[in-house]
Image (tube, grey):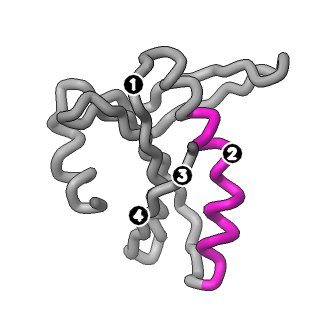
Amino acid sequence: MLARVFRWAPGEPERVQSYRVAVSADGTVLEGFVDLVYREDDGSLVVVDYKTDAVPSAAVSSRLAYYRPQLVAYADCLRAATSAPVATRLLFLNPAGSALDLTVSTG
């Protein structure tokens, strides 16, 4: 998936980078900036959030848990705005040159 995002998404006509979203949850307004949103061939949307954390293998699950609420909020907002299915991915871009691409469940 990682290579596909970098090769394919930039050429997609339905791709937005740095998309601003806001959602109200229980009267609390949450606001954020989505790094990348693109539409798959089946009409679903994919949210990709970039992180520059150097994530050791033992910490992957805790980092996923830490960032999951952010991705849930992004997915909820896009589902409400578009009625399209939304998938989410975390892309850890380690400054040392390695990358980790993770699917995050938001359902």
Kind of residue at disc 4: Asp
Kind of residue at disc 3: Ser
Picture quarter containing residue 47? top left
Q: Distance of mark 1 from mark 4, alpha carbons?
A: 22 Å
Q: Distance of mark 1 from mark 2, alpha carbons?
A: 19 Å
Q: Position of residue 53 (x, y in %)?
A: 58, 66
Residue receiving disc 1: 84
Q: Is residue 93 above or below residue 21?
A: below
Q: Distance of mark 4 from mark 3, alpha carbons?
A: 13 Å
Sequence-first tag of 1 and 2: 2
Sequence-first tag of 2 and 4: 2
**Circle 3: element type:** loop
Residue receiving disc 4: 101
| Residue range corresponding to the magenta coloring | 58-74
Kindly identify which numbered label has been placed on residue 105: 3
Kind of residue at disc 2: Pro
Q: Quadrant of the N terminus?
A: bottom left
Kind of residue at disc 1: Ala
Q: Distance of mark 2 from mark 4, alpha carbons?
A: 17 Å
Q: Residue at x 45, y 57 (%)?
A: 103
Q: Is residue 72 above or below residue 65?
A: above
Find out whether residue 84 is within the magenta segment: no
Residue 65 placement, left or right of 3: right
Q: Quadrant of the C terminus?
A: top right
Q: Position of residue 2 (x, y in %)?
A: 30, 61
Q: Distance of mark 3 from mark 2, alpha carbons?
A: 10 Å
**Circle 1: element type:** loop
